[in-house]
Image (tube, rainbow, N blue to C red):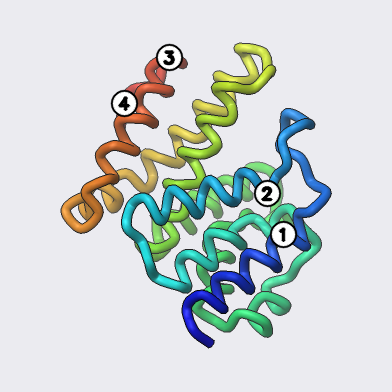
Amino acid sequence: MNKENIVLKAKNFAHNKHKNQKRKDGVTPFLEHLEEVVNRMKNLGITNEEALSAAWLHDVIEHADTTFEELNKIFGNTISVLVLSLTKNYNLSKKDIETQYVAQLKNSSIQSKLIKFCDISSNLKSIQNSPLSKTQKNKQIKKLFFYLRVIKKDIIEIESTYPKIREMIDGVNTIGIKFKQKPI
């Protein structure tokens, strides 16, 4: 399967799985978030078909009735493992979910970390512009900056490969500073 076909297949799969979902604001279609993540990946210069496919699919296990096995059957091991590395395990206790997820992020591939970075960037923009209370915004942004700090070292190390990472880091920091977060 060529690049356009696998990425298009992932986009169509994600569209089907998330078609009626909304962002936390209850208004914005969830699909806009996925498109923002993929566009951020492309803007960084990422052309890898598995990474772009996984960017489309990064929330399907967590937010849409999809299993790893289903993804693996349709998209193969590389893409399904990328998606799984970005998925929280809600079968664990609340405390263990976060502990496991942080360990997972730390040990994930650079492709997973790039997807997560683009995901966080999209989420920060969305939260900043949302009708949430300042307290809710602060709480969500604090958590996203926690995840950023987990992947920061690896993201900064590849800045020479993807120079536009600096622009995205600056954008993330601009939002973070407004919510009293220490820049990464």
Asked whether the beta carbons under mark 2 and mark 1 sit within 8 Å of each other, the answer is yes
Q: Residues under labels 2 and 3: Cα distance? A: 27 Å
Decide which of tag 3 and tag 1 comes sooner along the chain: 1
Q: Which of 152 and 8 is in front in this view?
A: 8
Labelled disc at residue 178:
3
**160 vs 181, nearest the viewer:** 160
Q: What element carries label 4?
A: loop
Q: Mark 1 points at which residue?
A: 15
Badge 4 is on which residue? 183
SS for callout 1: helix
Nearer the observer: mark 2 or 3; the answer is 2
Mark 1 neighbour density, 10 Å: few (under 14) some (14–19) many (20 or more)? some
Classify the position of the C terminus by image quarter. top left
In the image, residue 74 sits, relative to residue 109, either above or below, namely below
Q: What residue type is labelled 4?
A: Pro
User: How dense is the environment of label 2, judged by Cα within 10 Å: few (below 14), some, or many (20 and up)?
Assistant: many
Residue 106, position as x, y percentages in the image: 40, 55
Residue kind at label 1, given as amino acid type: His
Q: Mark 4, residues whose alpha carbon is within 10 Å: few (<14), some, or many (≥20)? A: some
What residue do we see at 16% from left, 53% from top?
Answer: 160
What is the spatial separation of the Cα atoms under label 4 and label 1, in whole angstroms?
34 Å
Which of the two discs, 2 and 4, sits closer to the camera? 2
Q: In 3D space, how far apart are the residues under numbered discs 2 and 1 (Cα atoms)?
A: 7 Å
Q: Residue at x 75, y 54 (%)?
A: 18
